[in-house]
Amino acid sequence: MIAQYLRLMRVHHWVKNFFVFVPLIFSHRLFHEPSDLRALVAFIAFSLATSAVYVVNDVVDAEADRRHPKKKNRPIASGAISPRKGLVLVGALLAGAAGVLTQTSLPFALIVAGYLALNAAYSFYLKHVVLVDIFAIAGGFMLRVFGGAVAIDVETSSWLILTTMFLSLFLAVMKRASEISLGESGAAKDSRKVLRQYSVRFVDQIATVTAGGVILSYALYTVSPRTVAAFGSENMIYTLPFVVFGILRFMYIAYHRGEGENAIDALTSDAPMIVAVLLYIIAAVSVIYNTTSL
């Protein structure tokens, strides 16, 4: 039963909350203990809030999930956990998040509250509105980054914010692309009616725009005067190939394997993607925390 509750909470999806650490890494605070602790508390708060959102969404979507070829196995949809017990878990998670937030600042607490409000709106309405649905998903990722910055009291680069926005939109539209691919049999479109308002061509165009936006905004970030001044070199540009490869590889996973619906599963099960992410992290940290020229 514990395993079912952990599945319901989607603990493995807490990886998404690593976006909270982006400002910590890119602001030279990674090895600053007070900032590390504040970022960790922020991560825990977002993780509890995220799990509460997932449970609410599963309760709301239980009937539709039962018609989905994969989602029908979720704890609520399958009947392993009752909706009532799910809502009790939501209360416990929100109480835990509130307790953690008492150790943070008011601005950060408001960001988490905004995240919860956005996702509540998404669960009950926004996910049924074409385009607004993917912007709502993207908004959740951006609030994580803003929350991470507020938690450690630093400003984030405008180019980094744009990169996060385009990356978030890219992941959201790739999710829709995989759902549409899966929905060729009609199962996915029955479970998510907004898919009827998307076409393969439309989604492909959005994917192209957002993928290009990620690459362009990140490229400009790496060579911006502020970045060069902050890191003491122009070496951040050498991390760009890993970003480009990651974007293209994820598109391959979504279009050729139809596995983009769950970004975390796709990212953690594809060996080339795992290697690319690790190499990017190593390269970025090396550049940020070591100003010696490559």
Image (spheres, helix red, strand yellow):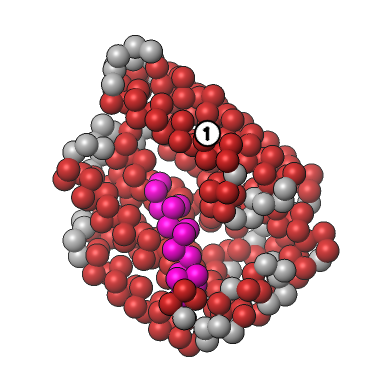
Q: Residue at x 17, y 43 (%)?
A: 33
In this rendering, does residue 214 appear at all?
no
Instruction: Name the foreground residue: 134 vs 36.
Output: 36
x%, y% of residue 42?
A: 29, 55
User: As drawn, is 74 to the left or to the right of 224?
Assistant: right
Residue at the limit of the structure toward the top, as seen here: 293
In this rendering, does residue 246 appear at all?
yes
Residue at the limit of the structure toward the right, as seen here: 185
Q: Which secondary structure lies at badge 1?
A: helix
The boundaries of the magenta stretch are 5-19
User: Is 55 situated above or below 16?
Assistant: below
User: Is 57 situated above or below 81?
Assistant: above
User: Is 237 situated above or below 44?
Assistant: above
User: As drawn, is 68 to the left or to the right of 169?
Assistant: right
Q: Main secondary structure of the magenta part?
A: helix
User: Is 198 situated above or below 51?
Assistant: above
User: As drawn, is 247 to the left or to the right of 94?
Assistant: right
The amino acid pointed to by label 1 is Ala
Q: Which residue is labeled 1 in the image?
A: 276
x%, y% of residue 31?
A: 22, 36
Q: Residues within 10 Å of mark 1 (few under 14, many from 20)?
A: some
